[in-house]
Amino acid sequence: FAEEEPDVRFATWAYTWSEIPPKSDFKFHDNVILYYNTIKLCPCHEYTDTTCSKNKNSSEYIKKWDSITNKLYLWEHTGSFGDAMAPMFDLDSINKNQRYFYENGVRGAFLNGRCDRPSNLMEVRAYLFNRLWRDPMMTDEEYNYRLNGFLEAYYGDAYKHVRNYIDTINEIGNVGCTDTHSKINNIAVIWETVLKGSHVQTCSSKFHFRDS
């Protein structure tokens, strides 16, 4: 259709089973956009973490797709779709993930953060992703500065408690693997864990703990 409709772009998705790039060497036409979907990746760990069973291949997939298309975009799942208000364990890694995508040819992103319902810390996450896609090479120091600045502006005197909650769920998430559609059946256990500062012991079958 390139000759008939030179100004039209066609989008396709690397989604679930099709996230694996083809083995053969070929190139997409310049009028084809590819969206790489993060639905199956684990938000508990950096997407480049090869010790994470869900993320171990993603960096190679991204590099391969980048060699196939010059219009690589991201469909990033930024909220929990299994239990909308369940914690997302990724606020200590999203800055590194966006930096990695930028360095490997991703030109932009569609950020899918809710599914008919608000998600946990939705406003915080919207602000952070907005800043990161304006400056994907943001240092860790600036990222934490912007996170704390938003928390203080949005939550006022309570911001230190919210930051402590974020740090705690990040620590909890670092010991396990999940995905954005996992269902955490016993939310009370999560809150009890946050308050006690211990690790989660009970959760759905989709939340698998790695040996520590």
Image (cartoon, rainbow, N blue to C red):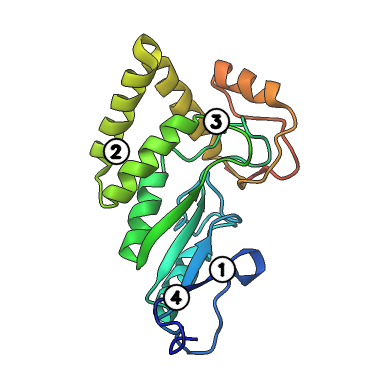
Q: Secondary structure at mark 1?
A: strand
Q: Residues at badges 1 and 2 in contact (C-beta under 8 Å)?
A: no
Question: Which numbered marker is on residue 198?
Answer: none
Label 3 neighbour load within 10 Å: few <14, some 14-19, many 20+: some
Q: Earlier in the sequence, mark 1 or mark 4?
A: 4
Q: In the depicted view, which residue is nearer to us: 209 or 98?
A: 98
Which residue bears the numbered disc 3?
120
Label 1 neighbour load within 10 Å: few <14, some 14-19, many 20+: some
* Amino acid type, callout 1: Ala
In the rendered structure, the answer to whether residue 32 lies left or right of residue 176 reads left
Give the spatial CA distance, label 2 vs label 4.
Answer: 37 Å
Q: Secondary structure at mark 4?
A: loop
* Amino acid type, callout 2: Tyr
Q: Earlier in the sequence, mark 2 or mark 3?
A: 3
Percent x, y for residue 195? Answer: 56, 16
Q: Residues at badges 3 and 1 in contact (C-beta under 8 Å)?
A: no
Q: In the depicted view, which residue is nearer to us: 27 or 145?
A: 27
* Amino acid type, callout 4: Val
Which residue bears the numbered disc 1?
14
Which residue bears the numbered disc 2?
143
The residue lying at 63 percent from left, 38 percent from top is 116
Q: Residues at badges 3 and 4 in contact (C-beta under 8 Å)?
A: no
Q: Earlier in the sequence, mark 3 or mark 1?
A: 1
Q: Earlier in the sequence, mark 3 or mark 4?
A: 4
Which residue bears the numbered disc 4?
8
Q: Earlier in the sequence, mark 2 or mark 4?
A: 4
Label 2 neighbour load within 10 Å: few <14, some 14-19, many 20+: some
Percent x, y for residue 128? Answer: 37, 38
* Amino acid type, callout 3: Asn
The residue lying at 57 percent from left, 40 percent from top is 114
Give the spatial CA distance, label 3 vs label 4.
Answer: 37 Å
